[in-house]
Image: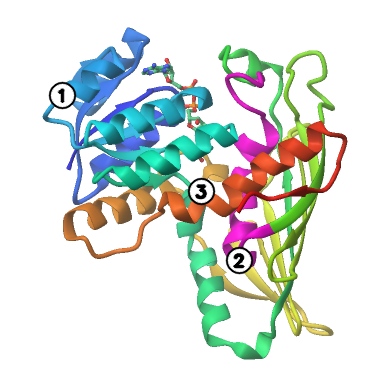
Amino acid sequence: MKSCIVGYGSIGPIHANAVKMSEFGEIEAICDVRNSRADQGAVQMGCRAIYSFEDVLKDPCIDVVHICTPHNLHVEMACQALAAGKHVVLEKPVAITQNELQKLIDADRKSKAELCVSLQNRTNICVRKMQEIIKSDSSIGKLIGVSGFLVWNRDATYYNQDAWRGNWKTEGGSLLCNQAVHIIDLMHVFAGNAKRLRSSISTKAMDGIIETEDTADVLIEFENGVRGIFFGTNAYVTSNPNVLELDFENVRFRYADQALYRIEEGAPATVVATDVAPQIGKNVWGNGHLSAIEQFYRHLILGSENYLTLESALPSAKSILAMYESGKSGGEWVEVDK
Ligand SMILES: NC(=O)c1ccc[n+]([C@@H]2O[C@H](COP(=O)([O-])OP(=O)(O)OC[C@H]3O[C@@H](n4cnc5c(N)ncnc54)[C@H](O)[C@@H]3O)[C@@H](O)[C@H]2O)c1
């Protein structure tokens, strides 16, 4: 597969390196509207530089387009790429409005090309291990609760580095749809579709600096009766690893600090799996870009493996949109779109 990375800011180089390390991909071009970034990427990757997305769409040598641009460009670019017959790796969040999300679903269904979402934490060893345990060990009982905690730091320097950050129109929200999207997605991987939820969103440390939220708490009722709790803030002094807890009838699992712990009443916690340290990118991003991209490319070439489909991202994507609806309405219950 010959690929083009569109948007060569902080995450674009991670995609480029992951493609380069994949057995099934090669970097054909780097595209960025900031010419100097495209040029820099082309030198780093030993490929062509392209300065406009329209040229990417027209380029017959490009099979896969990685969309690593600001949030408000995701859906438009993904739809255009799919219509041009290009496969797509789409960075999160998949969409920042309901209308956009529907447009993307329709374009994905209509196209013969395929779309993979960058929810790479799902490929982490601990997440896979937890899924295996659920399938194979009925003694843990039914899942009854899932909680997610995110305590990170995103300060004024972070928000001021790019004009698209911290605005409803271009980022579409901050804490929930940007930083917390991964842990919220994992909550849905284990608990399934949400039925309804209520949330509070606020701007604590970045008040007056950004218009979007830096802090949120959410109560979720899943369709299967599982209760979900999420708390997250970007207002802390540092970015600590997320914590995900799954409460089954007979045992609790905690995924934290890149380890999965099994916790039983009256006994010390035991480690049942550990993730590998990221080979590229920041610790909080996880190692998943490598495995998620490899998995998708393997699927495109061999047609065999599972990959991170848009369909699989819909439960968390719809919930996050509902969290904004509820948060903006003062915390009312909101039914999550089916
Ligand atoms: N999956 C993850 O863990 C993870 C981590 C970080 C960022 N991200 C996501 O990646 C995306 C990009 O984030 P970032 O931090 O790299 O942003 P960034 O601002 O650092 O980079 C975006 C790049 O896109 C370029 N760009 C803007 N408009 C363009 C256009 N029309 N055509 C081509 N290039 C264009 C910009 O010039 C910039 O270089 C966001 O959706 C973000 O949420 C995901």
Q: Mark 1 to mark 3: distance in Å?
A: 32 Å
Labelled pair 2, 1 in contact (Cβ < 8 Å)? no
Residue in the foreground of this view, choosing between 228 and 43: 228
Q: Position of residue 259 (x, y in %)?
A: 60, 64
292 relative position to 71: left or right: left
Q: Mark 3 to mark 2: distance in Å?
A: 19 Å
Tell whether circle 3 marks a residue whose Cβ is less than 8 angstroms from ligand 1. Answer: yes
Mark 2 secondary-structure assignment: helix
Q: Residue furthest bottom?
A: 139
Residue 166 seen anywhere in this rendered image of the structure: yes
Residue 225: mark in rendering: none
Q: Tag 1 or tag 2, which sits nearer the N-term?
A: 1
- The residue indicated by pointer 2 is 190
Labelled pair 1, 3 in contact (Cβ < 8 Å)? no
Mark 3 secondary-structure assignment: loop
Residue 59: mark in rendering: 1
| Residue 193, quarter of the rendered image | bottom right
- The residue indicated by pointer 3 is 286
Q: Residues within 10 Å of mark 1 (few under 14, many from 20)?
A: few
**Magenta span:** 166-194
Q: Residue furthest top?
A: 35
Kind of residue sitting beneath label 2: Phe
Kind of residue sitting beneath label 3: Gly
Q: Tag 3 or tag 1, which sits nearer the N-term?
A: 1
Residue shown at the point (19%, 37%) measured from the top left? 63
Q: Position of residue 210 (x, y in %)?
A: 73, 17
Q: Quadrant of the N terminus?
A: top left
Residue 260 part of the magenta segment: no
